[in-house]
Amino acid sequence: MSLAGAWYLGLAAIVFFVLVVAPAEVVVGLGIVVTNFRRRSTTVADDLNSLRG
Amino acid sequence: MLDASSLVVATRPAWPDILVFAASAAVILIGALGVVTSRNPVHAALSLVMTLFGVAVLFIEQEADFLAAVQIIVYAGAIVVLFLFVIMFLGVDRRENIEVEPLAGQRPLAFVLSAVTLAGVIAMAATSHWVTGAHHVVGPIQGHITDKASPSGEPAQLGKQLFTTYLFAFEATAALLVIAVVGAVVLARRPPVPEHAETERAEAARTENELGI
């Protein structure tokens, strides 16, 4: 709190909102992992090469 | 401590700051490279923990202690554990031979590092405040914009800001999280039996009836 004032708290609030957005992304990522596991029975990223030309 | 004028005038950072930044930046970069290059998703998740710890050190360096604590608790504590839980749940837990050491001499090294850590904790407890690690604690923590009638400190002020100035954004994040949860449920539920499969089965049953099987 040495960088006094609402200016600093505003920055902290922005970082806070970024922190909150991340769980939403994690939820989507885990959903993709689970769906992919159902289709291909693997979680190893190297095996997911069906889009490779 | 910085005053208002030093916010405008760019000051030369002291060498401990540079050292801390360089060390944590190296940790962050190594961890980030580990996340994208690991074949094993568990190793990728652990590299992610490494990166998040480095970012937390940077937060402390910026004197944003509350954000550093939130970073560790929310990211390293909750999200990575959730990730590991899902990965383990999906069955990466193949049988391992625990007699073979993947790294040569990792067991003696583990003992040495544990002893060093224990010695560090004991030394810190002996020479300074046992909870905070501060060398001496003088009274309650004083905030710069303390309101006498309200609790002081960064979390209290941040909370007040969140529910007043940033209330709309706060509500928007609540909606975002709800949408994410609904999306996760939609992604994770088993797909319903498709319509045409249903009619096909009914048709097959009807032909079977007609043939008298």
Image (tube, coloured by chain):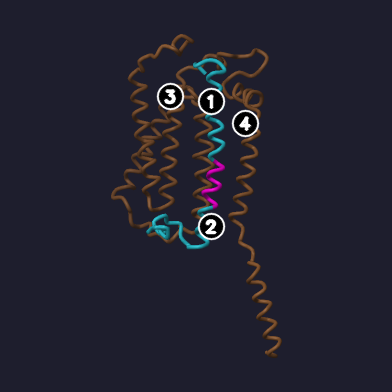
Q: Quick one: which residue is furthest to the top in this view?
A: B5
Can you say whether B110 is above or below A17 in the image? below
If you read the primary sequence from the N terminus, does the residue marked by circle 1 or circle 2 appear first? 1
Q: For the residues marked 3 and 1, what is the alpha-carbon distance in whole angstroms?
A: 14 Å
| Residue type, mark 3 in image | Glu
Prevailing SS of the magenta stretch: helix
Task: Name the subunit of mark 2.
Answer: A
Can you say whether B192 is above or below B115 in the image? below
Q: For the residues marked 4 and 2, what is the alpha-carbon distance in whole angstroms?
A: 31 Å
Of badges 3 and 1, the one in the foreground is: 1
Q: Which residue is mark 1?
A: A12
Q: Which residue is mark 3?
A: B61
Q: Which residues are magenta?
A: A23-31
- Where disc 1 sits, the SS reads helix
Q: For the residues marked 1 and 4, what is the alpha-carbon distance in whole angstroms?
A: 14 Å
Q: Which residue is mark 4?
A: B169
Q: For the residues marked 2 and 3, what is the alpha-carbon distance in whole angstroms?
A: 40 Å
Q: For the residues marked 1 and 2, what is the alpha-carbon distance in whole angstroms?
A: 36 Å
Asked whether, in this view, residue B133 is left or right of residue B97, the answer is: right
| Residue type, mark 4 in image | Ala
